[in-house]
Image (cartoon, grey):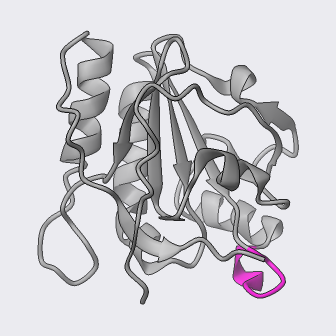
Amino acid sequence: MARTPSNMLALGTVAPNFKLKDTNSNNEYSFEDLKGSKGTLVMFICNHCPFVLHVIREIVMIANDYRVQGIGVIAISSNDIEKYPQDAPELMTEFAFKNKVDFPYLFDESQEVAKAYDAACTPDFYLFDNQNKLFYRGQLDDSRPGNGIPLSGSDLRSAIDALIYNRSLNEIQKPSIGCNIKWK
């Protein structure tokens, strides 16, 4: 299992817009369509990565906790489905149903969105403020498959709380670690 860190896009970067198909609804959405009134969480995930499988329940809890507080939540899969057919759109729909993912799970077939965000791994987290500027990028928490540290979502939850409640956030942020995005 590869351990690829986030590229750590510069804070303040404006969210790249996109138009992608949601595998849950079959609708196409842009960043503008899905952004929240207080901010937007964009996550790069996939169906098969052990790091994503390790954190998916916490991701869903965070989405459920913060969408009602004005945070838009978007998941994107950008993996090459020719080499990794387990990440195909129809299986994304099954994955979302099985894991109770009821926020948009978008398919980035061209991989242009992952490149625009400088995404490197799954999971990779980007939190944008209500002006679409990058406020946080990094890890969910210190838990990894097999390291014995329980999931808490503490790093991401602290960042979202700081955004919602207008608190300062440490600019030193730990990168996420996961499987590399499967490039074409």
Residue 81 in percent (x, y) is at: 79, 77
Up/down of 92 relative to 175, above or below = below
Asked if residue 142 lies left or right of residue 8, the reply is: left
The vertical placement of 91 against 105, above or below, is below
Seen from the viewer's position, the closer of residues 135 and 148 is 135
The answer to whether residue 23 shows anywhere in this view is no
Residue at coordinates 62% horizontally, 58% vertically from top-left?
96
84 in the magenta segment: yes
- Residue 86 in percent (x, y) is at 71, 82
Determine the main secondary structure of the stretch shown in magenta.
loop
Q: Does the magenta run of residues contain 53?
A: no
**In this view, 183 is above or below 159:** below
- What's the residue at 42%, 89% (across, down)? 1
Question: 17 or 7: nearer the eye?
Answer: 7
Q: Position of residue 156 (x, y in %)?
A: 29, 41
> Residue, x 74% and y 22% (percent of image)?
33
Q: Residue at x 60, y 71 (%)?
A: 181
Q: Nearer the viewer, residue 55 or 68?
A: 55
